[in-house]
Image (tube, rainbow, N blue to C red):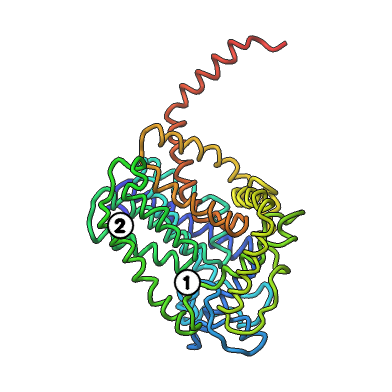
Amino acid sequence: MLARLGWFERVIVIIGAAALVLRAYYTLGIERHLAGPGDFYFYHWSANLIADGRGYIEPFRVAYENITEPTALHPPLWSFLLSVVSWFGGTGEAVGHLGAGDYFAHRLTGAVCGTVTVVLVGYLGRRVGGERVGVVAAATAALYPVLIVTDGSLLSESLYGVLITSALILSYRLMASHTTQRAVALGAVVGFAALTREEAVLLVPLLLIPLAGVPRQWLRRRVPPRLIVIACLSAMVVIAPWAIRNWVVFDQPVLIGNGSGAVLAGANCNLTYRGHSIGFWDIRCVPPKGRGSEADYSDRWRDKGLTYAEHHFGRLVVVGVVRMLRTWSLYQTTDDPGQKSQPLAVAVYLVLLPLAVIGFFLLKRRRRPLVVLLAPVLLVTLTSLVGYGTTRFRHAAEMSFVVFAAIAVVYLWDRRRELVSLTTRARAMAGPPD
């Protein structure tokens, strides 16, 4: 079967297989016990509840209060995907069980999603810089510890990476051929990304609208505005059923989720505006739920956070900068309060960072359109500025980051002899050491 494929496809298949093995080994061998943000309990438990026919309900209230309450605390798509695995018997630990137990079926689902992302990164790299860039990008994504750790975390980022990379590829395809089908596909993928992580709705102003040449100087070949409208409508069609469900169960408009209330309350308080946790999030800043539905107390939390930020606006400027630096691993680099310390992952990231910067400027010099690859970077930065800073939020930009770095690697490899020659000349001009 492989013999029928071109060399690029054969290499990508091999890299994808290696990526899956690495992710499975990390999950089953290196990091058998989950650690980090407790959100993985939500996804694991809610998936089991869905598979059990109880619907999308708040799993923590079921576990500890025996109360059945509809939820939109997190977007639903990742839980629904995991529920398919649960339905086929991959339930793992029961709802309410805390600790490092059996979550392997759901975690391996993340490993499979991560492998798909690796393959898609290869095709994204080929679309941007040719087949060699695609191979280097895929290999980098397969070996990149940040992505391996994420794919074993049981968090929604595993699926999110698939959808973000798909959206970038479809954007390039739409730019190359202005067809209605491609516009519909792109909008649908953006909608599904928003149903995985809520902040992906920002891809509408950051990715879809700029494809139409807004601002005009960003693109030489613009997508007709008619197709951008179709893409936006396609995204709305995907999101609409979930938004209608939320309006019905909460008796008020809730587009995707109720999570922003807790985010804003926990990120805007004394504990996160100063000291060791500046720019991060603290659960102690989130008040008790009080009366009403999930949407009601989320609104109260949101108001509390916004009020605090308004009253401390001068300090918010400093906090916003720290949030952004945290997300890009430029502040407390090896001590992110939101993640287990991963020194190897940080070290590899810091090696790739300057390469990604070089790759960005190489594309800029070649007058290649940057709006597509930069959209996730802007998305991540805005999410951190509005919410809080953590390397987890960076995931949407990791694929662009890897492609930029691959462009630089291929460029430097092609000019290795020139670089060696320049180094030799510099040493000769410097003269013998004293």
Pointer 1 residue: 256
Q: Residue at x 55, y 19 (%)?
A: 423
The quarter of the displayed image where residue 311 is located: bottom right
Tag 2: amino acid: Ile
Identify which residue, 187 or 14, lies in the foreground.
187
Q: Going 63% across and 48% down the picture, which residue do you hit?
A: 321
| 305 sits left or right of 131 in the view | right
Q: Position of residue 210 (x, y in %)?
A: 36, 50
Q: Label 1, label 2: how many angstroms apart (C-alpha)?
A: 22 Å
The residue to which callout 2 is attached is: 228
Tag shown at residue 286: none
In the rendered image, is residue 34 in sight? no
Please, what secondary structure does the residue beneath circle 2 have? helix
364 or 110: nearer the viewer? 364
- Up/down of 183 relative to 249, above or below: above
The kind of residue tagged 1 is Ile
